[in-house]
Image (tube, coloured by chain):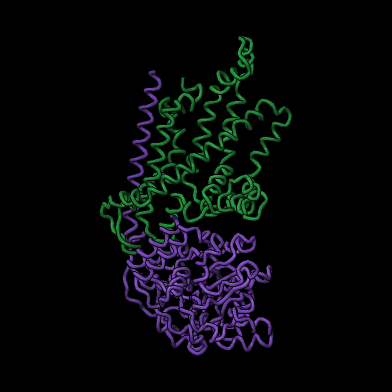
Chain colours: A green, B purple
Amino acid sequence: MTLGRRTVPYALLAPGAVWLVLFFVVPLYYMGKLSLESGTVGALKFNWQWSNYGDALSLYDTQFVRSFAYAGLATLFALLLAYPLAYAIAFKAGRWRNLLLFAVVAPFFTTYLIRTLAWETILSDQSPVVGVLDFLGLAPGGHVLATGGAVIAGLTYNFLPFMVLPIYASLERIDERLIEAAKDLYASSRQAFWRVTLPLSAPGVVAGTLLTFIPASGDYVNAQFLGSAGNQMIGNVVQSLYLKQTNYPSAAALSFVLMAVILVVVLIYIRFAGSEALMGEEAR
Amino acid sequence: MRSSERGTRGAALIVAAVVAATLALGLAACGGGGGGGIEGGGEKQTEAVKLEGKPSGSLTISNWPLYIDSATVPAFEKESGVSVKYIEDVNDNAEFFGKMQPLLAQGESGGRSVFVVTDWMANKMHELGYLQNFDRSGLPNFEQNLRSELKSPSYDPNRDYSAPWQSGMTGLTVRTDLAPDVHSICDLFDPQYKGKVDMLSEMRDTVPLVMKCMGVDPGEATEQQWLDAIDKIKGAVDSGQIRRFTGNDYARDLTSGDASAVIGWSGDAVQLQADNPDIEWRMPTEGCILWSDNMVIPVGAPNPTAAEAWIDYVYEPEVQADIAEYVNYVTPVEGVKEILAKREPELAKNELIFPSESFTKKCTIQPTPTGEEEQKITAAFEAVLNG
C-alpha cells in the first residue's frame, strides 16, 4: 500500500490539475480558436485570422491605456488608504482588532453590484459629498458621477479589502521584538518603520497591489454605472463585442491581448519588486 | 539549489501533462460537436409549422419576467387541455440569443415551443433560419384582432413568423419641473440642458429617434443616414451634452434630478409617474419608436400545434384584457380597451396603454439594420458608448 515517493506529489496535484484543465485550459483553447475565426455569427470560419489581434490593439488602444491608468490610480489610492489602516489594526487596535477586521470584510456581505450602485447615490449631483467637492473646486462641471473620477473612486472602494487583508497579514506576523531591537540601537520610530517594518511588510504590499490591480484592470461594472461614454474600460468593450455586437472573434482576441498585457505588466512588476518580497521568506 | 531544479522539472512535467490532456479533450470535443458551436447553421429557407389536429400534450414557453398575470396560463390549460411550462428566462435579447444560439444552430430549441423576443431579434433569428413560419389557418383571432398599425413591420410585412406579445413606445421622459420646455428629440440637444440628458444604450431606440430629429425617416434609412445620426450623438457626447447612456436605470437619474430629460420607454413611465408626479412621458413632436416583443416559434419546437393554440388564445380580447390590466404596456389586440373601459376606466383612458391612432400617427415601427450593415452600424454606435 505504499505509493512511490515520486508519485505522491502528482497524486496530490491531480484534483487541482483536473479542475484547471476543465475550467481554465479547455475554455482557453476554445477562446483561442474563436479568436482566429472570421465572419458573422452563424457563419464563422476558422481561418487563422491573425488580423483580429491587430485590430483589437489598434481599435481599442485608448481603452487599454485608460483601463491601466484607472486601475493603477485605484491601486495607488487603495494602498495609501490601506497601509495606515492595516498598520493601525495590527499594532494599535488592541482588543478592537477583530471588530475592525470584521468591518473591513463586512461590505462583502452585500453584493458587488449593490455596493457600486450605492456610489451612484453617494456621488449624485445633489448629494452633500458633491456639494463639498464642488466648493473645494474638485468637481469640474458641477458633477462627479459619470466622470473618470467616479470610476476610480468606485474601483478604489471595491478593491480596498483585497489590499488591506494581505498587508495586515504580513504586518501581524512581524515579531515586535525586531522593532524594539531597532529602537535599542537608537533608531527613531520613523527610522524603525522605514528600515524594519516596511521591508518586512513588503510581501503583503506586493500581494495586495496585484490582487487589486489585476481585477481592477478587467473590471467593467464600475465604469458602466459610475462612468460616462468617455470613461469606459476594456472590460466594457469586451462585453459590448460579445453581447451587443455578437462579434465573438474580436472579443476573444481582445481578451487574449488583455491577458497578455496584464501578464507582462505583472512580470515586470514582480521583477522590479523582487520575487522574494512576493514569496516572503520562503523564497530564500 | 538542487531541490529547486527538481521542482522545476516536476512542474514542467505537470504542464506537459496538462497540455496533452487538454489537446486530447479538445480534439474529442471537436470530433463530437460536428457542425455545432457558434459556427454552424445558417440555412435560410424557412419552413412553416405543421398543425396536427387538436392541441394536446405539453408546451414550454419562454418569456420575460413579470410579463403576464397569474390567471391566463391556468385558464389556457383548462380550456385547451395542454399542460404549460411557463418560464421567465428572457432578460435581455442578446443574452438570450447567446444562450440559445448553439442549440438553434443544430435545429433544436431546448424543449421550448414559443419564445418572446423584440422585433430586431425576431428578425435576426429569422435571417439565421432559426424560426418557423406560422400556419395562419390555426390563428383566426390573431388574424382578426391584431392592431392595424402593427400589421406590417418592415422586417415581417405579412406577420409570417412574429406575433406581438406586448408593444411599447420610445420617446421622451422628462422632469416637468426641471425641463418643462422639452417637447422634441431636437430639444435634447439644446445647450441649456448640457450634462442633464441621458439616452438609451439600446441603439435601435436612440439612433432612429435622433434620425427623426434630423428629418430622416428611420424606416427607410440608409447605412449612411444611420452613421450620420450616430455622428450627431457622438458630437453631443464630446461636448458634454449627454450625461450617459442607460438602460432602465435612467429612472434613477430622473428621480434624483441628475438628468432632467431622457429618451425613455412608455411602459416605465406609467410606474415612474405613480411614484413621482413630476416625471412625465411625452410624445416627441417628431413621433415615437413603436416596438413589440414578439412570440415566435423556433426551429425544432416540440408541439407546434399547442404553440399556435397559445398564440391565438392570447389574441382573444377577453384574455388579453387580463394581461393588459396587469402589465400596463401597449396591448397589440383590438377590442381590449372597450372591455377595460367597463372594468377599470382610468386604465382605458391612459394614452400610454391605449394610444389612439392620432396619438401615434408619426411613430415608426422600430427599424433595424441587417447583415453586414448591422455589424458596421452597431460597431459605430458601440464605439460612441465606449468612447
Residue at 43% over, 61% down: B235
Quadrant that contains the N terminus of chain B? top left
Furthest residue in direction right, as rendered: A95
Q: Nearer the viewer, residue A6 or A155?
A: A155
A232 versus A209 height, above or below: below
**Percent coordinates x, y for residue B70 in the rendering:** 64, 74
Residue nearest the observer in this picture, B356 or A93: B356
Q: Is residue A251 above or below residue B327?
A: above
In the image, taking residue B136 as reference, residue B177 lies left or right, namely right
What percent of the width, then of the height, locates residue A138? 58, 45
Residue B124: quarter of image: bottom left
- Between B284 and B375, the one lying in front of the other is B284
Q: Residue at x 43, y 53 (%)?
A: A237
Q: Residue furthest left?
A: A47
Image check: A104 left or right of B283? right
Q: Point out residue B240 in the picture as x, y percentages from the top left corner.
A: 50, 58
The residue sitting at 61% across, 61% down in the picture is: B252
The quarter of the picture where residue A179 lies is top right
